Image: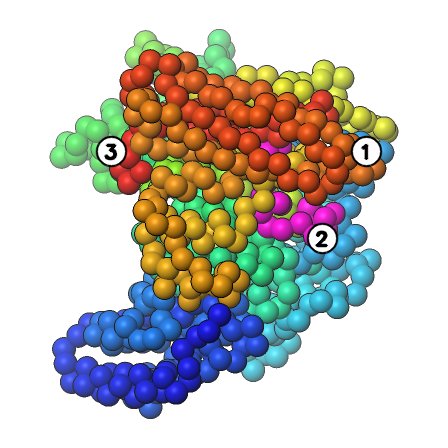
């Protein structure tokens, strides 16, 4: 595609320089800005010449660009005044100019649970040994992490018995600041590392790819950590710890510091990762949606996917509010959080001789005398005379009398959220309390709790029992028991309250998130020698327990890397489709409930799929309500199902360009973004956000459905079944799960594929059975099956307008 000539740009740059110099004398707020100039030229010359000229002129006026983007896309970042930024946005070749914001990170047993789930759900899979299946990645896939860095000495990242670094790798290993050139070393596991210091954080000791937060180390080990036997968190949650793709290589791009992750650094990381040759990019952070062309993650991931790189992102931790999902552009895989079947049990004994057991959960590593009980009170009874009663009963700061609290176990109510648990326990501990019992139905995340102080969480119904005991006993006493980690008894998966929910704020016509993966109380590697992470009286841990969609994202990144290893020719869209359409859970086969890795020759076939837990019931939210695709997308991710999806939905580059058209961007603006568009590209006339329903996505979402007229969407599927199974010539038939009040028809009802690679299309028609507006959003699914594979697409239909915001 022809871009502006260098001469033209020179002319405009000199005008720009003059304008900038005039702006310097004016009063205007200044800040860091990103100047995004669209796609890089194929030879990294013409478009980047434009960037070079503009950045050079800025230097002459004392405005030094901090980052320059030239590999996957064009642009730079610089400190500008508001007036300078406005002038810059009007220059030829500029797509957008926007403030350089600070993004926040979205901050074991999980893989064993996914293995168990995959087998319990009768996924089509044949393997002589599932341990071999976990270690299948003979192909050297490379996962790039844009995060807080990595701790290379962790055992999860040893390179024993690994092959030489892949020849396709073009990256580098930045070892750290000049005074300590060997302070960071890569190996055959961590093959690349870069760092990008924020303008807000220029500490020279931080000039290293090394992780000082723990987040990057944790997520990298979840996705690609080596197998470690007998790992545990101070004896809890013991077992084998491994990443989803243990033989994948790691490239770390440290774009985050103590203050967060600056947008310009994130874009620099994307730009380098594209040039370095990664296969998957994993990003566990986000920015609340406003404009996809002013979102560093949306921009960077667009160009990465354009180059064949799969990008996996966390959905955010802003749940359970509706429309809180982030990273929801269709070229991203958006991952919400779910629980696993491991629980940390910390029960309570009420009374003395005739004690009563109350079940609780918590991580308590304090030295507990099992024979000694403590006095038990409700926080309300410790209220200070000048405090609000609600503040006292919830153990808020400065609301309780320390004389009353001292030496007692305090029962607190919780009305806010998980992070506040830590503040409550700190308040009780500060006042001399010996422990805290929190009454809360919605707190699954235990990672915020100080394990050196006795804290346990109970359900409301159990809280009523405790309050009855307190009110009926002259001197109530209780004992908080030591924590035990148990597996198999928890109702899992369920969706925690913190996990961000759909629909997407910018448009209801795409269904997000895409998939759910384990993200609650996940054990993974940590910084070595981190005293800040050590409970009182304990040595620093080698692993840590963290929760968030930050932890969910690398689970899917590991699976994506394994898929790329097994199917090198698959596009990012095919990988996403395989993960989504096999994401639902299905009826169990009882013979595999006690599955062990040494069982030989296990063969399963698919049956009709529904979203079910490990107990055979529907997936629920943390509050106990039946979960919907707004909570989990296509369902819980499965480990082996994506390797054999049968059919895939290839969302192509034109779908993504049309998505931008439907959002309202102009054709001229979109032409600057991509080098891969057809000659003479133009946005469809009279298009709207509602047309997004028709991009070839594995799920379907229809907005503004008034019930008086039918709505039609089309989809195309590609046959990718294995030739080894002999199912090249195959017929799929459709089954429909539609809610009451909604009629769903699919034409045709049979798809006959004659060879691998065949593409066939179908049309879905939605109509109301009552010719009236839907009272609430409706959910269902369309499943294509040939007796061996089930290819399931969830749908959501709403009467709300596309740009309506939920209250």
Q: Are marks 1 and 3 in contact (CB under 8 Å)?
A: no
Q: Using a 10 Å C-alpha cutoff, classify the residue at mark 1 as few (fewer than 14 neighbours), some (14 to 19) or many (20 or more).
A: few
Helix or strand or loop: what does disc 1 sit on? helix
Measure the alpha-carbon separation of dots 3 and 2: 45 Å
Which stretch did the figure color magenta? 562-586
Q: How many tags in the picture?
A: 3
Q: Position of residue 557 (x, y in %)?
A: 60, 48
In-image side of 396 versus 137 (left or right): left
Dot placed on the residue nearer the N-terminal end, 2 or 1: 2
Q: Reply above or below: 365 against 681.
A: above
Q: Position of residue 349 (x, y in %)?
A: 48, 18
Q: Position of residue 231 (x, y in %)?
A: 68, 43
Dot placed on the residue nearer the N-terminal end, 1 or 3: 1
Helix or strand or loop: what does disc 2 sit on? loop
Dot placed on the residue nearer the N-terminal end, 3 or 2: 2
Please say whether residue 503 is one of the residues in the magenta stretch.
no
In-image side of 381 versus 163 (left or right): left
The residue lying toward the viewer, choosing from 694 and 796, is: 694
Measure the alpha-carbon separation of dots 1 and 3: 51 Å
Q: Are marks 3 and 2 in contact (CB under 8 Å)?
A: no
Q: State the residue at coordinates (54%, 77%).
A: 44
Q: Quadrant of residue 645?
A: top right
Q: State the residue at coordinates (37%, 14%).
A: 769
In-image side of 355 versus 423 (left or right): right
Residue identified by numbered label 2: 568
Q: Is residue 649 visible?
A: yes
Please name the predominant secondary structure of the magenta segment in the image.
Answer: helix
Residue identified by numbered label 3: 807
Judged by depth in the image, the label closer to the viewer, 3 or 2, is 2
Residue identified by numbered label 1: 725
Q: Using a 10 Å C-alpha cutoff, classify the residue at mark 3 as few (fewer than 14 neighbours), some (14 to 19) or many (20 or more).
A: few
């Amino acid at each position: 595609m022809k871009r502006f000539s260098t001469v033209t740009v020179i002319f405009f740059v000199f005008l720009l320089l003059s304008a900038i110099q005039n702006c310097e004398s004016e009063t205007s707020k200044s800040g860091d800005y990103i100047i995004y100039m669209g796609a890089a030229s194929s030879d990294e010359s013409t478009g980047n010449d434009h960037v070079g000229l503009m950045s050079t002129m800025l230097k002459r006026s004392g405005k030094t660009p901090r980052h320059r983007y030239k590999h996957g896309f064009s642009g730079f970042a610089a400190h500008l005044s508001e007036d300078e930024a406005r002038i810059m946005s009007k220059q030829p070749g500029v797509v957008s100019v926007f403030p350089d914001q600070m993004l926040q990170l979205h901050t074991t047993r999980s893989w064993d649970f996914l293995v168990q789930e995959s087998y319990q759900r009768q996924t089509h899979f044949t393997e002589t040994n599932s341990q071999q299946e976990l270690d299948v990645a003979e192909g050297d896939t490379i996962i790039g992490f844009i995060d807080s860095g990595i701790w290379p000495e962790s055992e999860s990242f040893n390179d024993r018995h690994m092959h030489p670094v892949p020849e396709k790798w073009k990256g580098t290993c930045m070892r750290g600041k000049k005074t300590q050139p060997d302070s960071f070393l890569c190996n055959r596991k961590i093959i690349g590392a870069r760092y990008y210091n924020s303008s807000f954080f220029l500490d020279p000791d931080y000039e290293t790819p090394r992780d000082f937060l723990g987040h990057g180390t944790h997520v990298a080990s979840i996705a690609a950590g080596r197998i470690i036997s007998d790992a545990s968190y101070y004896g809890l949650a013991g077992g084998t710890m491994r990443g989803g793709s243990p033989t994948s290589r790691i490239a770390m791009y440290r774009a985050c510091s103590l203050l967060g992750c600056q947008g310009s650094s994130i874009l620099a990381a994307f730009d380098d990762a594209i040039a370095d040759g990664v296969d998957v990019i994993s990003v566990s952070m986000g920015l609340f949606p406003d404009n996809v062309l002013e979102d560093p993650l949306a921009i960077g991931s667009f160009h990465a996917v354009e180059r064949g790189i799969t990008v996996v992102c966390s959905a955010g931790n802003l749940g359970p509010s509706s429309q809180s999902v982030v990273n929801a552009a269709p070229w991203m895989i958006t991952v919400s959080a779910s629980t696993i079947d491991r629980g940390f049990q910390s029960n309570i004994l009420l009374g003395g001789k005739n004690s009563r057991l109350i079940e609780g959960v918590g991580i308590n590593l304090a030295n507990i005398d099992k024979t000694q009980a403590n006095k038990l009170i409700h926080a309300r009874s410790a209220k200070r005379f000048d405090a609000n009663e609600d503040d006292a009963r919830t153990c808020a700061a400065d609301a309780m009398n320390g004389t009353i609290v001292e030496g007692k176990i305090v029962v607190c109510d919780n009305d806010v959220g998980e992070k506040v648990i830590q503040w409550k326990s700190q308040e009780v501990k500060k006042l001399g309390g010996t422990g805290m019992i929190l009454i809360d139905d919605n707190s699954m995340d235990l990672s915020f709790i100080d394990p050196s102080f006795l804290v346990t969480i109970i359900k409301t119904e159990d809280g009523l029992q405790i309050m009855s005991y307190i009110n009926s006993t002259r001197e109530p006493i209780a004992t908080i028991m030591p924590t035990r980690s148990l597996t198999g008894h928890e109702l899992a998966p369920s969706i925690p309250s913190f996990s961000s929910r759909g629909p997407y704020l910018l448009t209801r016509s795409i269904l997000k998130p895409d998939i759910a993966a384990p993200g609650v109380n996940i054990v993974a590697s940590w910084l070595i020698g981190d005293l800040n992470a050590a409970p009182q009286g304990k040595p620093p841990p080698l692993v840590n327990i963290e929760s968030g969609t930050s932890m969910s994202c690398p689970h899917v990144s590991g699976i994506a890397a394994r898929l790329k290893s097994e199917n090198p020719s698959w596009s990012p869209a095919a990988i996403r489709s395989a993960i989504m359409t096999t994401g639902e859970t299905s009826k169990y086969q009882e013979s595999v409930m006690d599955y062990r890795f040494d069982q030989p020759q296990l063969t399963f076939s698919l049956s009709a799929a529904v979203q079910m837990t490990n107990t055979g019931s529907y997936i629920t939210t943390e509050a106990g309500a039946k979960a919907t695709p707004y909570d989990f997308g296509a369902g819980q991710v499965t480990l082996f199902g994506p390797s054999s999806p049968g059919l895939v939905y290839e969302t192509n580059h034109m779908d993504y360009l049309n998505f931008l058209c439907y959002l309202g961007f102009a054709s001229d603006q979109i032409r600057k973004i991509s080098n891969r568009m057809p000659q003479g590209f133009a946005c469809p006339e009279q298009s709207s956000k509602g047309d997004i329903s028709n991009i070839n996505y594995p799920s379907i979402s229809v907005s503004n459905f008034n019930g008086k007229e039918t709505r039609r969407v089309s989809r195309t599927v590609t046959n990718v079944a294995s030739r080894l199974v002999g199912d090249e010539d195959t017929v799929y038939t459709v089954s429909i799960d539609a809610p009451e009040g909604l009629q769903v028809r699919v034409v045709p009802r049979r798809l006959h594929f004659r060879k691998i690679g065949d593409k066939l299309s179908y049309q879905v028609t939605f109509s109301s059975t009552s010719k009236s507006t839907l009272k609430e959003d409706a959910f269902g699914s369309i499943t294509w099956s040939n007796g061996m594979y089930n290819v399931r697409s969830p749908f959501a239909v709403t009467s709300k307008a596309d740009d309506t915001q939920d209250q």
